[in-house]
Amino acid sequence: MHLVSDVNVKPVSEYAPEDAALLCSVGRLICAWTMLEQSLEAKVGLMREGMGDVRTVGARTRPSMTKLMTELRTMVAMRDRRNASALTEISAIERDMQRIDRFRALIIQGFQQPEPGGFACRDPRNNQIHVSLDQLEGEISALEEVAQRLLAV
């Protein structure tokens, strides 16, 4: 079944074995982001418990990363009233997370097709961008580093 009638586009089932690294890296990026979300949610939950609040984070709906970061920043500000270094670190983490999230959105929403050394994407302005496997691996590493920094706050 072909979803696109263009002869230059092949179905995923026809990707060559050499595309396996690409597909694996895209999956690792998505999994690393999800693990970051879960770690942040768990950290906020533990901090709540430590402050005497036993509610679960996002009891009705799953909170967004923005809401979780806001709650984390608020709790850290209450915990460390005289030490602003943790809040400075949280701000730096948020900037890194926003950059990585833009990259993640580019990959998820703009993926076009594999190319030698990486793959083609289209950004929100419809510009064609080549993303190398090295760039993708670098962002995965940066995401894992952000997760470690976040847990250390």
Image (cartoon, rainbow, N blue to C red):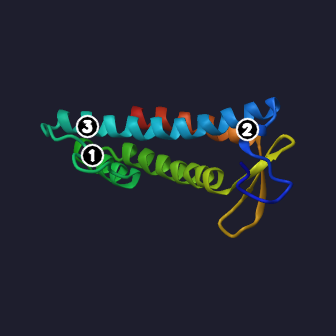
Q: Alpha-carbon neighbours of circle 1 within 10 Å: few (<14), some, or many (≥20)?
A: few
Q: Nearer the viewer, mark 2 or mark 1?
A: 2
Rendering quarter of residue 123? bottom right
Secondary element at tag 2: helix
Q: Indicate the amino acid at tag 1.
A: Arg
Dot 2 or dot 1: first in sequence order is: 2
Q: Position of residue 70 (x, y in %)?
A: 33, 53
Q: Foreground: 119 or 45? A: 119
Q: Say whether marks 2 and 1 touch (CB < 8 Å).
A: no
Secondary element at tag 3: helix
Q: Position of residue 80 (x, y in %)?
A: 27, 42
Which residue appears at 74% of the width and 58% of the height? 4
Q: Indicate the amino acid at tag 2.
A: Ser
Q: Marks 2 and 1, Cα distance to the nearest angstrom?
A: 57 Å
Is residue 60 shown left or right of residue 121? left
Mark identifier at residue 53: none
Task: Please state the total of marks drawn on the protein image.
Answer: 3
Which residue appears at 28% of the width and 51% of the height? 61
Secondary element at tag 1: loop
Which residue appears at 82% of the width and 59% of the height? 6
**Picture quarter with the C terminus:** top left
Q: Marks 2 and 3, Cα distance to the nearest angstrom?
A: 41 Å
Q: Is residue 129 above or below residue 83?
A: below
Dot 2 or dot 3: first in sequence order is: 2
Residue receiving disc 2: 13
Mark identifier at residue 45: 3
Q: Alpha-carbon neighbours of circle 2 within 10 Å: few (<14), some, or many (≥20)?
A: few
Q: Marks 3 and 1, Cα distance to the nearest angstrom?
A: 23 Å
Dot 3 or dot 1: first in sequence order is: 3
Is residue 118 shown left or right of residue 72? right
Mark identifier at residue 82: 1
Q: Say whether marks 3 and 1 touch (CB < 8 Å).
A: no
